[in-house]
Amino acid sequence: MNTSNTGITMHDANYLSATELLACFRAGSLDPVAYLEVLVEAAACQQSTVNCAAKLFVDEARIMALEARRRYADGTARPLEGVPVIIKEETSVKGWPRPLASLVFKDKVATENHPIVDKLLEAGAIPYFQATNPEFCVLGHTWSKMYGVTRNPWALPYSVGGSSGGSGAALAAGVAPLATGSDMAGSIRLPASLCGVYGYKPPFGRLPCAPGDEYMVQAVEGPMTRTFDDLVLMQNVLSGPHPASFTTLPYAALPTEYGDLRGMRIAYSPAFGHPALAADVKRNLLLALDGLRQRGAIVEEVELNWNLDEINSVLLDGLRAIFVDEFMTDISDADAAKLCSYSTHLRDAAGKARPSVMPSAALGQQLHREMQDKVWGQGYKAFICASMLTTNLAADQDPMLEPLLDLDGHQVDAYLGWCLTPPFNLLNRYPVLAAPTGLSDLGVPTGMQIVANAYDDETVFQIAANHARAGTSRLFIERFPEKFPSLSQAA
């Protein structure tokens, strides 16, 4: 691709947003076929460091890019025509491998598309990059025996989060502007925050789920992007009914333009009263809140002292009751040796008394009552908190080997105890948008969760739009990960 006539350097090209790409494609200043090759080069080169690709599907993508070129020429381009997209390995694409990062299922191939993949294809997007996830998507980091360790493009020793860690890392590494994720305990919001991108956990029913997942209300698919505008663009493509899903709400498009926050009341609690919140995570959160105040919001702290250990335990028991235990017990003793340590732990637990999902419903109702008393019932339109307690998390952290993390003298469970996301999987009709807030002292991105009451998606997007305009983080605007070999050689 010749970028000399566009004013775009090769480094800039890798980090173009989908919104910018579409404008360039329409204007004829970039060619979808040539542009795909730029990203394919970056995708190949990041693998020796970041390692976020499960597999690339380049030949198929080149055919789709040729189709995109033709459609731009004849005026039939679709909403995402020619935009390359990252697909989380868990998300089914017909004909692509879907082993769930497990050697037990190393030969499994998807036989149909997930509904959101159909929507992306119908909109003209080009899936070419299959992103890593941990085995069975049951870890807050992204490593497995099958794929190895996925590392953070901003600081390679550190975690990208999980389970959509490959998607977050791929966005940060500049291999595509859009990615799919899924979230049942923070699996979109944790990687989004640790990789410095935007991620959206929609309320259950906003996006179509895969057949068979209709009763897994704690778990949803959602978009991940580097820019706010792209998050709106992608969410508007993914949402709404699909023939394979009977749980999806009628289509409701999000606005693409948002006013300021004048007079809007927003509540916040940095970490639900948890004493182990890292100073740099809190600092960046408070700077982001100041940015919202500059946009007209009235931002006030509220006291929420939630027992995160109880929340995590109840959520995990609910997930075990719905599908994890049954799934794990289907794995034979002969295959058990192939499992990662964290999957082995869950399989061992599955052999004991089967938990109930009812405590999840009861605790979710209790949390909602407190939110009603202290937030919604007090006139606040939204609630904001950090996404995690710390960014000091090794990329290959194994919570089975080191079950406790020491956070400035506070011991927390290494599996979920550092996460601030699980409450909103119990409150699964709440929309939650993860937005970047800056870099920690370790050079790892930090993030916040923007939460609204049930199905009030537009409010979280309005706040995120104003956060983006306030520009307090500057990630992927002025600050980028160190250039990867493909980018430094091309610059």
Image: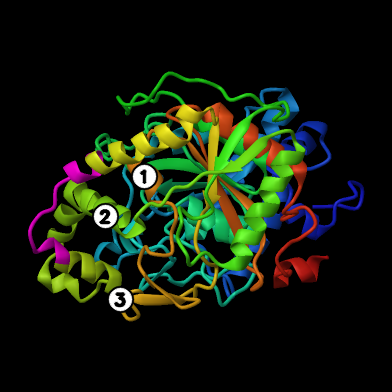
Instruction: Please say if the residues under marks 1 and 3 sit with CB atoms less than 8 Å apart.
Output: no
Using a 10 Å C-alpha cutoff, classify the residue at mark 1 as few (fewer than 14 neighbours), some (14 to 19) or many (20 or more).
Answer: many
Name the residue: 45% across, 38% down.
117
The residue drawn where x is 38% and y is 47% is 423
**Is residue 61 covered in magenta?**
no
Q: Residue at x 27, y 40 (%)?
A: 216
Instruction: Give x and y (percent) for residue 378.
Output: 50, 29
Q: Are marks 2 and 3 in contact (CB under 8 Å)?
A: no
The amino acid at mark 3 is Met
- Secondary element at image label 1: helix
Number of marks in picture: 3
Instruction: Please name the residue that numbered disc 2 is placed on.
Output: 316
Task: Identify residue for label 3.
Answer: 400
Circles 2, 1 touching at the beta carbon (< 8 Å): no
Secondary element at tag 3: loop
Badge 2 amino acid: Leu
Front-most of residues 289 and 462: 289
Q: Which segment did they paint magenta?
A: 349-361
State whether residue 466 appears in this view: yes
Amino acid type, callout 1? Asn
Q: Secondary structure at mark 2?
A: helix
Q: Nearer the viewer, residue 457 or 146?
A: 457
Q: Is residue 55 visible?
A: no
Q: Can you give x and y, in whole percent of width and height, for residue 472 in the image? A: 74, 51
The answer to whether 298 appears left or right of 456 in the picture is: right
Label 2: few (<14), some (14–19) or many (≥20) C-alpha neighbours in 10 Å? many
- Identify the residue at image location x=53%, y=40%: 383
- In the rendered image, which residue does mark 1 sit on? 425
